[in-house]
Amino acid sequence: MKNISAKPVVHRRAVAEGRLELSQESAEMILQNAVGKGDVHQTARLAAVQAVKATPVVVFECHPITITSVEIHTELKDRTFLARVAVEALDRTGCELEALNGVLMALLNVWDLVKPYEKDSRGLYPLTRIRDVRVVEKTKKAPEEK
């Protein structure tokens, strides 16, 4: 891992987002809160928080950081499930990987919940796609600048 010991501890914030394209059936099941495995929005939020905290376990060069806040927003628009994760930390390195990991795991968990409604007759997922996962904001400020 890169040596960051000489860098100052600063307030950092990163926001990532992504989307999961779904079938009409899945979208309707989510809207009706009728997905058999459970509450899709709640599961996505829990998965995102857990993933943010576990990022150094799955991203091998990632430093464990002092996370001070995680905010998750989920939304269903037409047939697209949107996840947005904001992470704040007081540390020597950024938190964008944590935000990205949170988004990806939120979307992957939603995919898992709606699998029965997404499969075609061959057991494949012709409409299901995780797309446009990206960092949309990244800031850092010295503690006195907050």
Image (cartoon, rainbow, N blue to C red):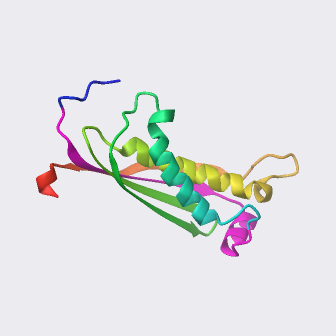
Q: Which residues are magenta?
A: 7-34
Farthest residue in the right direction?
121
Residue 143 place in picture, x, y as percent: 16, 51
Q: Quadrant of residue 35?
A: bottom right
> Does 17 appear in magenta?
yes
7 relative to 87, above or below: above
Residue 81 place in picture, x, y as percent: 59, 62
81 relative to 92, above or below: below
Residue 17 place in picture, x, y as percent: 46, 54
> Does 35 appear in magenta?
no
Farthest residue in the left direction?
144
Instruction: Tell me which residue sits at (56%, 53%) in the image.
Output: 47
Instruction: Tell me which residue sits at (56%, 48%) in the image.
Output: 105
29 relative to 47, above or below: below
Would residue 23 appear left or right of 88 to someone viewing this image? right
Would residue 114 appear left or right of 136 to someone viewing this image? right
Q: Could you tell me which quadrant the N terminus lies in?
A: top left
Residue 95: tell me if it is visible: yes
Instruction: Tell me which residue sits at (54%, 67%) in the image.
Output: 75
How many labels sit on residues? 0
Q: Nearer the viewer, residue 135 or 54?
A: 54
Residue 132: tell me if it is visible: no
Instruction: Tell me which residue sits at (75%, 54%) in the image.
Output: 115
